[in-house]
Amino acid sequence: MKQLIIDKARELGFCAVGFAPAAVGAREQARLDAFLAAGQHGDMDWMARNAERRRDPRVLWPEARSVIVLATNYGPERDPLGDLGARDRANISVYARNRDYHDLLKKRLKRLGRWMVEEFGCALKVFVDTAPVLEKPLAAMAGVGWQGKHSNLVSREFGSWLFLGEVFTTLELEPNRPEVDHCGSCQDCLDICPTAAFPAPYTLDASRCISYLTIEHKGHIPEEFRAAMGNRIYGCDDCLAVCPWNKFAQTASEAAFVPRADLDLPLLTTFLDLDDVAFRTHFSGSPVKRIGRDRFLRNVLIALGNAEATAVPPALEALLLDASALVRAMAVWAIQRIAPPDQLAILRATFEPGEVDEDVRREWRPIGDCE
């Protein structure tokens, strides 16, 4: 039965398949509890609300007896760390440079599920990051990889670049042997983090993570993290990309994961005049779309402030009057980072006195701090 499922999954385009019991180990449960208790989930309140279902697959679905973990490779053609030097370019995380992987994997999982129901007469549910599932611990238990010190999954065959999906089923399937941790003494992933988001090996403080800050966080990004963001406007690949196991990684062959030309390091300034309709159109089918235009421009403006530009583009100046206070505030921050003194003095005289939004007013620093 397992071999038939593996064969069908590979036929559908999955590159790795593993089998685990419908349970999560005590160590992983304890890590989740500590993560939530320390507030390291930031404002992702949904994690705390669904903690019990996340800790135990059978709370999520009592009929589940086995979990089939399926993985798809999205390995990049080039090392993403090399993109950090393109300061005037928008650096989007590798996984988001084309189609939303959730859509593709969900369709494949449903096709696999329909086949399993017809073949074995079982009941099942499929998930792609769409329910409270501890997918990385389950993948490790299923032998697909192991959780590295950065808490992400690592594979000896595909390195760090795997999308995961799960099939919960009533079938009693013999579990695979869990993958062994092969990190050894290496801590490259911890050392490279630009915001020191790892207080200890295997422990992530998401509230300091650039991926969290640029994607999940809805408000103003704390100033202490802005310079460290560099040109990253959606996600961060540093801890994944630096892993030595990527020497075995393979470039993705799936067309949906090959970067779109307009999302592969585009100029930051190309996004400054996007209104809501243009944003939704430009990012149709992309995971970037879900953060909305205002948060996206927040990120772009921070990156522009880090770009070492020597003049303020007219489109940036126009954002000082944007309808969103989130955007206006980051326009102020970016302008104070790049404007020549004479231009900054004019902009301050024009926009600062009439400013009534407290969050925007706070971004205007004392004159001495801007010189």
Image (cartoon, helix red, strand yellow):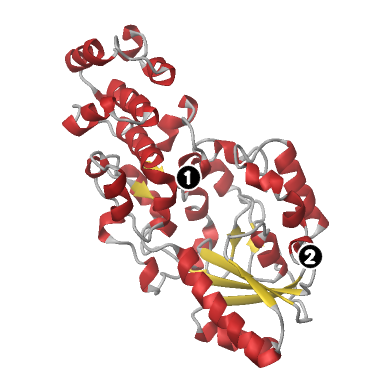
* Residue under pointer 1: 215
Mark 2 or 1: in front is 2
Query: What secondary structure is found at the residue carrying circle 2?
Result: helix
The residue located at (59%, 68%) in the rendering is: 165
Q: Position of residue 267 (x, y in %)?
A: 24, 45
Give the answer, above or below, for where 292 lies relative to 77.
Answer: above
- Distance from label 2 to label 1 (Cα)? 30 Å
Q: Residue at x 20, y 19 (%)?
A: 340
Q: Amino acid at mark 2?
A: Arg
Q: Nearer the viewer, residue 264 or 290?
A: 290
Q: Compared with residue 47, is residue 137 higher up or lower down, i.e. above or below?
A: below
Between 356 and 341, the one nearer to me in the picture: 356
Residue 255 appears anywhere in the view: yes
How busy is the neighbourhood of tag 1: few (under 14 within 10 Å), some, or many (20 plus)? many
Mark count: 2
Left or right of 357 on screen, residue 173: right
Q: Residue 157, relative to residue 84: is it above or below?
A: below
Quadrant in the picture for the N terminus:
bottom right
At mark 1, the secondary structure is helix
Residue 338: percent from left, percent from top: 26, 25
Whether residue 198 sits left or right of residue 240 in the image: it is: right
Picture coordinates of residue 345, whole percent (x, y): 22, 11
Q: Whole-percent x and y of residue 265?
A: 29, 51
Q: Nearer the N terminus, badge 2 or badge 1?
A: 2
Q: Which mark is residue 58?
A: 2
